[in-house]
Image (tube, rainbow, N blue to C red):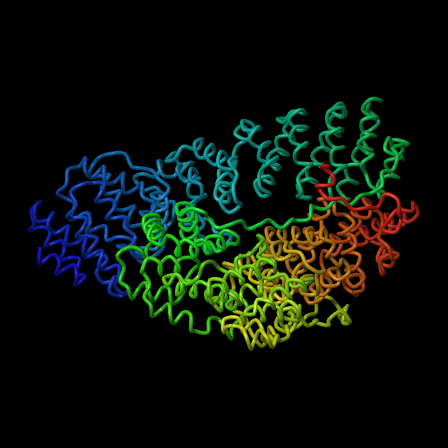
Amino acid sequence: MSELLTAVRAGRKEEVVRALAGMDRAARKEALAELKSLRKEARGWGWSERATVRHALLVAGAGCHTGAAACAAWIGGQDLRDWSGTPYALLLNVLADRDPAWLGDLAHRLAARPSTSTESDYRLIQELVRVARCPLPVTDGLVGGWVTSVNSARWQGKGRSRLVDILRAEPHVATLATALFEGTEPPPGLFWYDRADMTDDWPNALAALAGEGVLERRTLADRSVSRLLRGGKPGDLRFSLTMVRALELTEDEEAARVADWIAMASDGGSAVAGHAQQVLVRLDARGALSTHALADVSASVLFRTEKKLVRAQLTLLGAALRRDGATAGQLLPVIAEAFGHEDMDIRGRALRLIGRHLSGATPALREDLAFAAGRLGPMHRAAARDLFGDLPADDEPTVPYEETLPPVPEPRPLGAAASTVAELVEEVSALIKSRSREAPSFERALDGLVRHARTDRTALTEGLREALAGVWWLDDQPQDRVDRWFAADPGGLDVVAAALLGRVSGGPVKNGRKRRTATGTCAHAALNGVLYARVWEVAALLPTGQLPFLLATPTWHTGALEPAELVERLRTYRHLGTRPGPVDFAQALLRVRRSGTEAEAVEAALLGTEEGDRLAAWLRADEPVARVLPHGLDSHLPTPGDWHDRGAPGKRWVLLSTGEHPVLAREFPRAFQWLGRSHHPLLNPCYHWTPERSGPWSATLPQDAEAVAAWLMPTLLHGTDEGMRGGAWALPGLVEAGGPPGGEALHLALAYGLGSRHPDDRLSSVDALLILAAQDRLDPALLGRELAVLIDHDLTKVNRLADAARTAATTGAYRTVLEVLSAALPSLLGYQRAPRALGSIVAVAAECAEQCGPTAGGPIAGLAETAARGGSTQLVRQAARLLAAWEAGAGAGVGAGAGAGAGVSTDTDTAS
């Protein structure tokens, strides 16, 4: 055993094998206990020391275990592995004396572990199965290891081997090839291409083996099609789609799966639906697609947003009608469904297609088609009347337009802290294990820890110790490691609980309170630094029992604190003879509502304490924490010359600076002083490329959304210009707290969010836009100008803004969106060469104008000139459509100034 342990500590794997060969069962059992202790000890070592012993410890432990389950757990341990996986040849050596049934059990247990998914794991399991003569356990991890192993074999030796040759020699290729389509996500090695036109790839190799009879062709086809039907992310379906194409299905094979192609074309992703549609076109040309099936699939495809698919489906329907006019009764009503499509061109195509085949329609069918044509807008109503005469919708009374906005969010009371220790322990445990800092749950739990640590400390510590069992810093970890971890990142409630349980030393807590957390860096670090300063202060004061409760705990879920409540808390502190924590009181001042609070200021001054006087002065000053300075770019629009001629990224950035707040910089704790200084984003660069843990930021300054928006502007810019995800997720929370009308920072932040690269960011921004409009804090003209600024500086794509605007409009906020776009379009229409996809924004504006009528202030400057250019570009056609809707609405007396019927409702109003 001494020889074994010496070899393990030295990292000599081969000597471990020789030492195990001379040890009997009893000696190995005795050595196992020492190896477990060594493994536990090694977890506290440095990286290089652990790397030295890792594989030797893995081999030794595997050879000493007698149970298959325990041996599999040991081999699968992440701390005993590195990038190369496991030394499987040595493992096979030390396990060679085991019973074949035991080895088979071990193979299946290893395959079931998610960590055993490397090439070496596959080789180990494959050899164990061969010796045990048992079936190969097929799991996602094993399949992934097999793919990696095959890819590696392509480059072994002097030259590169063909993939099909390697797969042909694989003993389990038939079993594993079909399993490639079963997992939730395909193994990443399947997409290992040297170049885009590479033919020596997995789909082509598998198709070649199917042609040779090594693999069953029908099974591959069925598994591929079934995987496409299950759906998923486009990247996860790429392999199966390429496989279907590589198999080159015969006419009979395609005809046998008509229902599958219909389902894919109806509900599949764009690429999958496009392929299925091509198959259906071939089936229709061969007469293998019934009229009923064509109508069925068309009813779904014509509702898709991909215009290319819809146009192709209309072409397919036109071919079927030309081939057999008797199908008009079934197909024309389906085509009429396209009258409700969002794209004007598609509506026009559908109307023209119906017009070409209307002669054979029955009177009843003509009546139904005329009713459907009533949904067409002004651009197509004249053509529809030429076909059908007066439309049924012409006789309907005009219903005054009413804007629909979401209900104004009402602030929700935060609620009292948990009344019992058991309830508090459950909340704290959940927050620590999820690493969450989101208000209001974080604020309730932090205040609860302070309250119960003062009144029932013993029960609280016992409950936390039991609930947090398994959290790494509560295990038997070296104290210096725990201290270093918390010094670098105190987390949320982690350091507070650790201090309460005696798992963080007094030195780090003292240093955490003293150090200048995040000062001198960017807003991300500064706002996180405020949170860190709060938890360090609580960690320091909690063991003393000095604090009865926290002053900064919000009244409302937004983070806002009512001044009367803060006055009452200070009065209780005075009665108890307790001095507030400086950081806690500073955070309370930043959260307290400052407008219309003279009565509370008087009450605060009457307390006769230093904190009462500071609160009174703070309420009476009613100044923003940071004054936002305008960017002053409006006068430069449009930029002379073509829109696409732009300078370097740093010069085209549009960011906002903030002024200083002397009181904040002078009287507040050091962690807050960054907030009170003047900042210019180009002089104070931000290197945070991910918006992680941004939840509590708006709750840190709930009264100063303008300042927070200005400070987070670089994050929003990177979300539009460089594609960072998540930058706009904080916008709804930023506007939800309410307050005065939004200023330039909030509107510019909203403009960036609406132009974000990722759809989920744009959706968050649309939510913020609608909330701001429902609160009557939105300045549509200002937002429109900011959108034009971003497009002028090439900081966002026009099609993204069009998507966001369309999403907002379809909620019922047509007038709000039209007012925003009406302010943006004059600048955008003034370029000699228009921005790409500008027609998509004009199309959204036209849709809005058709729904709600024109806005006040006259026609949009430059619109008539654009519509008069001639040609068939989308911009010209949509400009003509918008102009027609504007003139029709103005002639009918509808619009912003039309009076009767024009109004705004919320979802709550509508429901009532």
Q: Where residue 213 sits in the image (x, y, percent)?
A: 39, 34
Q: In this view of the protein, which residue sits in the foreground, 124 or 210? A: 124
Position of residue 258 relative to residue 870, above or below, is: above
Q: In this view of the protein, which residue sits in the foreground, 631 or 415? A: 415
Position of residue 319 relative to residue 309, above or below, is: above
Residue 343 visible in the current orientation: no
Q: In this view of the protein, which residue sits in the foreground, 479 or 80? A: 479
Quarter of the figure that contains the N terminus:
bottom left
Decide if residue 320 is on the left or right side of residue 152: right
Quarter-of-image position of residue 662: bottom right
Q: Where residue 488 sits in the image (x, y, percent)?
A: 39, 67
Decide if residue 469 is on the left or right side of residue 574: left
Quarter-of-image position of residue 562: bottom right
Counting every numbered tag in the picture gives: 0
**Which residue appears farthest toward the right when viewing the image?**
891
Q: Where residue 406 sits in the image (x, y, percent)?
A: 69, 46
Decide if residue 760 is on the left or right side of residue 22: right
Decide if residue 696 is on the left or right side of residue 371: left
Q: Where residue 405 sits in the image (x, y, percent)?
A: 72, 46
At x 32%, y 50%, the residue is: 462
Q: In this view of the protein, which residue sits in the foreground, 183 or 573? A: 573
Residue 542 visible in the current orientation: yes
